[in-house]
């Protein structure tokens, strides 16, 4: 398994540990002039949960891949937390913020993979 896939797996594991929902992986590799190869998008139901998801993602990637995000933005109000892992950017939204920005559909040419929610 390559490093990018290991990182994707560690990120989704962290999201699922804190019950993040509606996980979508957007593969941007076939699109020219993108800032990264993948977006991983999910949501939490409260600012507390989005912050906890971000912390779990950071912990999971540190343990599983021995890496940490280059930058994390949005933890203060936690309506949209973005985590930069160079070739992967993780977006953790509150539902209404996710609906407003609708970034999955801004990248209409991306191949989207939805992961089932874990109860």
Image (cartoon, rainbow, N blue to C red):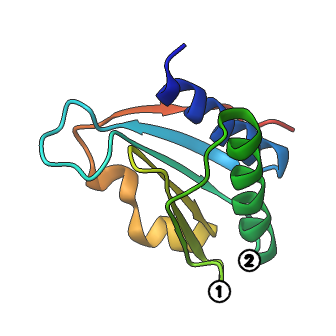
Query: Residue visible at 70% across and 48% down?
Result: 21
Task: Point out the image quarter for the C terminus.
Answer: top right
For residue 103, which quarter of the picture? bottom left
Task: Relative to 47, say whether 98 is above or below.
Answer: above
Task: Relative to 67, say whether 116 is above or below.
Answer: above
Task: Relative to 44, say whether 89 is above or below.
Answer: above
Label 2–label 1 contact, CB within 8 A:
yes
Q: Which residue is under mark 2?
A: 47
Pick the front one: 102 or 35: 35
The furthest residue to the bottom = 76
Distance in Å between CA atoms under marks 2 and 1: 7 Å
The furthest residue to the top = 1
Task: Point out the image quarter for the N terminus.
Answer: top right
| Residue 19: percent from left, percent from top | 81, 49
Task: Relative to 64, say whether 93 is above or below.
Answer: below
Q: Which residue is under mark 1?
A: 77
Pick the front one: 48 or 68: 68
For residue 80, which quarter of the picture? bottom right
Left of 39 or right of it: where is 36? Answer: left
Give the SS element for disc 1: loop
| Residue 64: percent from left, percent from top | 72, 34
Q: Compare marks 2 and 1 and give the one earlier in the sequence.
A: 2
| Residue 9: percent from left, percent from top | 63, 30
Q: Does residue 21 appear in the picture of this structure? A: yes
Left of 61 or right of it: where is 70? Answer: left
């Amino acid at each position: 398994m390559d490093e990018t896939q290991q990182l994707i797996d560690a990120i989704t594991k962290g999201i699922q540990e804190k019950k993040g929902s509606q996980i979508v992986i957007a593969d941007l590799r076939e699109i020219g002039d993108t800032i990264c190869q993948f977006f991983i998008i999910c949501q939490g139901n409260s600012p507390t949960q989005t912050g906890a998801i971000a912390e779990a993602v950071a912990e999971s990637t540190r343990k599983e891949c021995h890496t940490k995000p280059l930058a994390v933005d949005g933890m203060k109000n936690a309506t949209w937390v973005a985590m930069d892992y160079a070739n992967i950017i993780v977006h953790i939204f509150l539902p209404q913020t996710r609906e407003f920005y609708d970034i999955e559909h801004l990248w209409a040419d991306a191949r989207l993979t939805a992961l089932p929610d874990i109860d």
